Image (cartoon, rainbow, N blue to C red):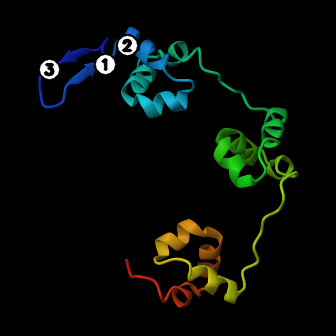
Amino acid sequence: MEHAKVVGERQKSVIKYTYAVVKFEASKYPSRRAFFAGSKGAYRAANRNGWADDVCAHMPHTRWSRDLVLNAALGYPTRKLFQQGSTQAYRYACVNNFLSEACAHMPAIRQNWSLRNLQDEALKYQTKTAFCQGSCSAYQTAWQRRVLERICGHMDAR
């Protein structure tokens, strides 16, 4: 970091974040989330010193409303993509009890799992972890119906 002052000479150098350094770092990012992900130290220094609003002024900050969330949701074909693509809008809709309205245009993708379908789905995976990550609804249904151990008998015990 070219504008940082290095304090001490231990194995790891300690960086002293000045206002100018933090502002420069923040200017590299389009959002607070990206700023945090790319430069955690500078982000934390901005918050700790009360500079966050100033150094992040160039970043858009959305104040969600019902209308904004409903419009944002129209850009997504499924609930999952809406949740992943616009986390804050999705959360706002959940907290304010209008998620169903926001997702009304999305097709209901609901799998009714029979025991045979669960077994066929489980056979696609080598471990329970892979099963859980690859087919979460099948895994959860099998667990709830207490058939998980039976349909996962072929899997490696990892």
Taking 73 as reference, is 15 left or right? left
Taking 88 as reference, is 57 left or right? left
Cα separation between marks 2 and 3:
18 Å
Q: Residue at coordinates 19% horizontally, 17% vertically from top-left?
A: 7
Residue 145 visible at all = no
User: Residue 8 has which mark?
Assistant: 3
Q: Where does label 2 land, which residue? A: 21
Q: Residue at coordinates 54% horizontally, 73% vertically from top-left?
A: 131
Q: Where does label 1 land, which residue? A: 1
Q: Residue at coordinates 66% horizontally, 39% vertically from top-left?
A: 88
Judging depth in this view, the residue of 105 and 57 nearest the camera is 105
Residues under numbered marks 1 and 2 in contact, where contact means CB atoms less than 8 Å apart: yes
**Amino acid on which the number 1 mark rests in the picture:** Met
Residue 52 visible at all = yes
Across and down, in percent, residue 1 comes to: 31, 18
Q: Give the SS element for disc 2.
A: helix
Q: Quick one: label 3 or label 1, which is nearer the N terminus?
A: 1
Q: Quick one: label 2 or label 3, which is nearer the N terminus?
A: 3
For the C terminus, the image quarter is: bottom left
- Camera-side mark, 1 or 2: 1
Could you classify mark 2 by the number of other residues whose Cα lies within 10 Å: few (under 14), some (14-19), or many (20 or more)? some
Cα separation between marks 3 and 1:
15 Å
Across and down, in percent, residue 44 comes to: 41, 26
**Amino acid on which the number 3 mark rests in the picture:** Gly
Across and down, in percent, residue 67 comes to: 85, 34
**Amino acid on which the number 2 mark rests in the picture:** Val
